[in-house]
Image: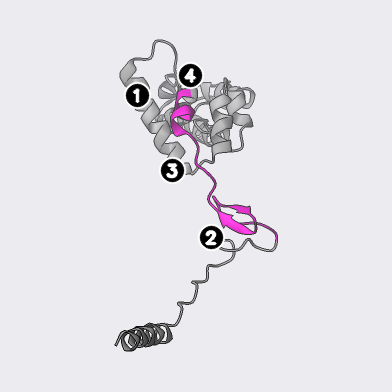
Amino acid sequence: MMRAWMFGLIAAVAACKQGSAPAAAPTVAAGAERGSCRPDRSCDVGLTCLSDLCVRPPPADCTAVAAALGGIFLDNYTPVEERARYAAEVQQLCAATGLTREDGACLAKATSRADLQACPHPLGLGDCGTIATAAEALRANSAVDAYLVTPADRLIERCKREVPSLAFERCVVAAATMDDLGRCAW
């Protein structure tokens, strides 16, 4: 009786194995996450080729990045609420950008805007091209003699020498008049 029961159990297990063929491994496109690296060892944006497999590298410590940028872009007298709002904005931008641990370490070590600009993926910096375009548009729309040096001209020259903040860029782009432009804090 015991043998019959064991034989039945073995037959049932064998039938189950025959009825269920192993599922084929899903194929992932080369360069995509968990897929093979392309022949040139490249992967999709945000991925790194390790052991011929495209993987997502560890993320940046966005809290440390926010603290470092706060030290660069905010002064000692910035109210706590504004600091907290700025830190939350930087943390959100850091996460949305998909910075790697190495990118975050570079940003967290920065002590100046020039240091930030030297990082592979800087955050918080304005774009001189965008600033110059907005300033040129303001100058063209104002009734200023074309041969006079305007605040827009000075701003464009300063942008070439210094590293503007993202907040400054936003202010320049939002300016509707030359007076508004003069209120933008570098």
Q: Amino acid at mark 3?
A: Ala
Label 1 neighbour load within 10 Å: few <14, some 14-19, many 20+: some
Can you say whether 36 is above or below 150 in the image? below
- Residue 158, quarter of picture: top right
Q: Mark 4 highlights which residue? A: 71
Q: Which comes before the other along the chain, label 3 or label 4?
A: 4
Counting residues from the start of the chain, the first of labels 3 and 2 encountered is 2
Corner quadrant of residue 153: top right
The residue at the point 63 percent across, 53 percent down is 50
Report x, y in % for residue 44. Answer: 56, 57
Sequence order check, earlier mark of 4 and 2: 2
Amino acid at dot 4: Gly
Sooner in the amino-acid sequence: mark 1 or mark 3: 1
Q: Name the residue: 45% across, 22% down.
A: 70
Between the C-alphas of marks 1 and 4, the distance is 12 Å
Q: Residue at x 44, y 40 (%)?
A: 95
Please tell me the numbered disc located at residue 96.
3
1 relative position to 124: left or right: left
Which residue appears at 54% of the width and 46% of the height? 57
- Number of marks: 4
Q: Nearer the viewer, mark 3 or mark 2?
A: 2
**Does 42 appear in magenta?**
yes
> Is the C-beta separation of discs 3 and 2 under 8 Å?
no
Relative placement, left or right, of 114 versus 97 is right
| Cα–Cα span, label 2 and label 1 | 37 Å
Q: Which mark is residue 34?
A: 2
The residues bearing labels 4 and 2 have C-alpha atoms spaced at a distance of: 38 Å
